[in-house]
Image (spheres, grey):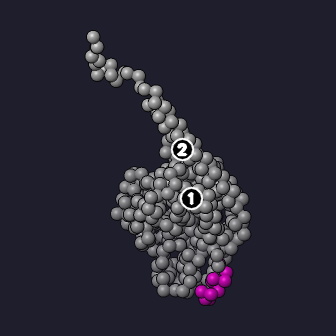
Amino acid sequence: MNQIKTKKEETLTPLPKFVKAIKTKRIAKSGLILECIDEMRQEIEKFAKELGFDLVGFTPAKISVKYADAFTKWLEKGKEADMEYMKKKEARQNLRSILPDAKTVIVLGVNYYREQKPLKSGHGRIARYAYGRDYHKTIGKKLKKLENYIREVHKGKTKAYVDTGPLLEKALAEQAGIGRIGKNSCLITKDFGSWTFLSEIITDLDISNKSEKQEIFNMCGNCKLCMEACPTGAIEEPGVINCNRCISYLTIENKEGIPSKFVSAISKAKTLYGCDICQEVCPHNKARQRVSNQPDFQKPIAGDSINLEKVKSIKTDDQFLKIFAGSPLMRAKRKGLQRNAETIAPTKKLSQNPKPQNINSQKQ
């Protein structure tokens, strides 16, 4: 007499051999795919470092909700000042609006730190990143070569940016394990501190470190040195910069006059173009900063500082172009740089608060 098996017994019945074989093949295939992905990632990282990139990370092409929400709140409070390009929220939060079928973002970092000489009398300080040739140009060349490699060797579609596109690049860098965002809103890396240029390649290759846990190093804790050191109080809360108060914004992106309430702070700091103060006081930077060995960053154009009277004496935009061609200082234009120089050291005929000028009306 045949016994009737219970449901429990049926579920425990050994699988037929051919089913086991299929499952074994699937596991083997899955393992092979993962091995190929790891190998592809290693090849891309190796080639990137041969090109001169110091840091390479991979993250899924999706922004975590916490970053997207924080960015939305930042915009709602008007902390982007008049930088209209910052308001492209959709692209920043949906990378597939930039590259359909985007699956991975390759995040790349280049160390740009250099020592600065003591500021000479009558000079204005230039932020370290603007010492030599514009990093958009130098890193852009490296990115183009890496893009070509990915397209030709690995048959992937790509879209690259060097601080030029609608990306939340520090969020992507943190997701990729490149570093952590500090209270000064800079990305702090384990190898170089925050003295790092970031760039990204979005690709349809599915090669992100989805299962790899990124090592988390101890961050800011109770330290508030950057917040306390900012001359204009631009770091209003940990990780949140109010661009309306930030010296870098005021001396570079700002196209109007320097607001009177910030004139004294800028004059005292002697910041002619950009500002490094919140990075200079950071303990992570003091422990990790290393002078960059990038050849492109060694030849000065603006240098560490510029004589303020020399800046004021530039008569035409053509003369300005001849002096600063290829430099990040082209961003401020002649009138912007001269406005900054007058703010630091006003001539006798000018007041402490130079009359606002519309820089957009000037030719570069």
> Could you tell which of marks 2 and 1 lies nearer the N-terminus?
2
Label 1 Cα crowd, 10 Å radius (few <14 / some 14-19 / many 20+): few
Determine whether 121 is above or below 35 in the image: below
Task: Identify the residue shown where x is 54% and y is 59%.
Answer: 156
Between marks 2 and 1, how big is the CA–CA gap?
16 Å
Task: Identify the residue shown where x is 55% and y is 55%.
Answer: 106
Position of residue 316 measured from the top left corner of the image (x, y, whole percent): 61, 88
Viewer-closest of 239 and 32: 32
Q: Amino acid at mark 1?
A: Lys
Determine whether 123 is above or below 104 in the image: below
Position of residue 264 measured from the top left corner of the image (x, y, whole percent): 52, 70
Q: Which residues are magenta?
A: 315-324
In which quadrant of the rendered image does the C terminus lie? bottom right
Examine the residues drawn in magenta and state their main secondary structure: helix
Which label number is shown at residue 155?
1
Q: Please tell me in which quadrant of the rendered image residue 276 appears.
A: bottom right
Callout 1 secondary element: loop
Q: Is residue 263 visible?
A: no
The residue carrying mark 2 is: 33
Position of residue 160 measured from the top left corner of the image (x, y, whole percent): 54, 64
Q: Amino acid at mark 2?
A: Ile
Callout 2 secondary element: helix
Question: Position of 105 compared to 79: left or right?
Answer: right
Position of residue 362 measured from the top left corner of the image (x, y, whole percent): 52, 86
